[in-house]
């Protein structure tokens, strides 16, 4: 299979490291592999790095497009309400706001932001500001560097999960959703509206508390804090994380609209990866951020001086591969046309070679048909019966030797016969003739008279031919 781009998402959990590989092709995304490294912070770095190296080797992907999701407790979400007039100079205004949040001059904050647009111009401009302390970010980068990873993007896992969900839902950016990421120790709940997180909070799961109670309590707080309009409706509650399936069993009958996020994703994947899709959802969202340009929230907490900038020549292999793919597709499209033209040419040559033979065969066929017609005519002529001759032959055999026919006519199979014979034999002629197989309806005709010259009786009879 041809892949256009590959990305690896790494989620830094409190205890485990979750790694997912997502590839893109002409049909969409392909979820190819997932790995959980348990207790990565306590284990020997060489051992953890060996497992990571095995993952990249198995997937045959490079490490240039790695998206890292830092723990939620390390990320600060703030919402800024600013006058709409500052939109043209928004980046500088946000910088001033970030500096006001820094506790000391030595403790810097790394940040990125996304404007929240509600479609109502003229009001205040709202901005989602995401920050992380530089010291914490440097610690994460040092750990990743020791594990052989140099991320191209660092972001919050919830933002990446929201980007993946919104990017695969078509018109999902125009609706309001609640997104719940349920880990074994707690929940991170976010409200998505207008394609942006308008509220986010992380809460721990207390001993003895059910997932249903925790989710209902956090949803109640979220609806109040997100400042939803009175007529605004929540399209659905999307659940992700390794504990989501258990929580879904508890709450689905009481809270309508609850769904597992895996039921909404349309990536290609094996049945094995399908089974762990809920567990891998956040790391899959991180990998999705690495292969998709049009993200609802494009956030990168990595400082500009740490980012890897590809030079123009680095795009040459991608361009060459794209051209090769385009040429291959064009070749596939033209293959049938070229084959049809070659086949048509070969057929024309074969027809020209056989044309002389076909003409000779057609001439012989015409001669044969003419001879068959002549033979049929001769056969019909020879098979015709001379019925008059047969009747006369029959009469000669039936009439007495001293009686003979003097006149014979055949008018459309109506026969009139005149005979002469001795007076003693003339009465017996009609019964004898009536026995003929060639004649029927034999009846006397006219009167019997004597020929003065011969002294014999002259008599006539009529009959019909037996057709």
Image (cartoon, rainbow, N blue to C red):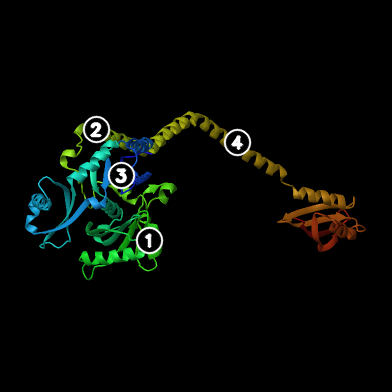
Q: Residue furthest right?
A: 424
Q: Residue at x 76, y 50 (%)?
A: 388
Q: Is residue 154 above or below residue 209?
A: above
Q: Give me the C-alpha separation between circle 2 and circle 1.
A: 48 Å
Decide: marks 4, 3 in contact (CB < 8 A)? no
Percent of width and height locating residue 255: 35, 67
Q: Which residue is mark 2?
A: 316
Percent of width and height locating residue 91: 11, 50
Residue 25 visible from this viewpoint: no
Q: Which residue is mark 4?
A: 368
Q: Nearer the viewer, residue 262 or 321?
A: 262
Of badges 2 and 1, nearer the viewer stands 1
Side of 122 relative to 27 (left or right): left
Q: Which residue is mark 3?
A: 10
**How many numbered discs sit on the rendered protein?**
4
Q: Earlier in the sequence, mark 4 or mark 3?
A: 3
Mark 3 residue crowding within 10 angstroms, few (<14) / some (14–19) / many (20+): many
Q: Which residue is mark 1?
A: 247
The quadrant of the image that shows the C terminus is: bottom right
Q: Give me the C-alpha separation between circle 1 and circle 3.
A: 24 Å
């Amino acid at each position: 299979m041809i892949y256009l781009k590959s990305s690896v998402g790494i989620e830094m959990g409190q205890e485990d490291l979750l790694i997912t590989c997502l590839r893109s092709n002409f049909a969409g995304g392909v979820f190819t592999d997932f790995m959980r490294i348990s207790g990565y912070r306590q284990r020997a770095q060489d051992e953890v790095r060996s497992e990571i190296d095995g993952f990249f080797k198995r997937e045959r992907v490079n490490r240039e497009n790695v998206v890292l999701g830092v723990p939620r407790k390390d990320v600060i979400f703030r919402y800024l309400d600013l006058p709409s007039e500052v939109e043209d100079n928004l980046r500088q205004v946000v910088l001033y706001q970030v500096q006001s949040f820094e506790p000391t001059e030595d403790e810097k904050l790394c940040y990125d932001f996304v404007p929240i647009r509600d479609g109502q111009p003229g009001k205040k401009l709202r901005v989602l500001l995401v920050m992380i302390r530089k010291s914490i970010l440097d610690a994460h980068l040092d750990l990743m560097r020791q594990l052989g990873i140099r991320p191209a993007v660092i972001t919050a896992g919830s933002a990446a999960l929201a980007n993946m969900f919104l990017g695969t839902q078509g018109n999902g950016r125009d609706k309001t959703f609640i997104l719940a990421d349920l880990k074994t120790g707690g929940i991170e709940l976010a409200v998505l509206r207008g394609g942006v997180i308008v509220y986010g909070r992380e809460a721990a799961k207390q001993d003895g508390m059910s997932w249903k109670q925790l989710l209902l309590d956090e949803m109640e707080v979220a609806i109040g804090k997100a400042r939803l309009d009175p007529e605004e409706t929540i399209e659905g509650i999307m659940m992700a994380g390794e504990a989501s399936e258990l929580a879904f069993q508890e709450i689905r009958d009481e809270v309508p609209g609850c769904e597992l996020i895996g039921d909404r994703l349309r990536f290609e994947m094996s049945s094995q990866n399908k089974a762990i899709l809920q567990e891998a959802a956040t790391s899959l969202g991180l990998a999705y951020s690495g292969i998709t340009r049009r993200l609802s929230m494009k956030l990168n907490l990595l400082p500009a001086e740490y980012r890897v900038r590809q030079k123009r020549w680095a795009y040459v292999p991608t361009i060459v591969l794209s051209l090769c793919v385009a040429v291959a597709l064009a070749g596939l499209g033209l293959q049938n046309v070229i084959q049809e033209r070659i086949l048509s040419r070969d057929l024309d040559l074969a027809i020209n070679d056989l044309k002389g033979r076909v003409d000779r065969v057609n001439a012989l066929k015409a001669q044969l048909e003419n001879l068959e017609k002549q033979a049929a005519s001769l056969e019909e002529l020879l098979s015709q019966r001379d019925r008059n001759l047969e009747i006369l032959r029959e009469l000669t055999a039936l009439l007495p030797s001293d009686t003979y026919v003097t006149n014979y006519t055949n008018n459309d199979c109506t026969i009139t016969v005149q005979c002469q014979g001795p007076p003693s034999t003339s009465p017996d002629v009609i019964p004898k003739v009536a026995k003929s197989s060639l004649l029927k309806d034999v009846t006397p005709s006219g009167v019997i008279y004597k020929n003065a010259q011969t002294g014999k009786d002259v008599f006539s009879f009529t009959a019909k031919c037996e057709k």
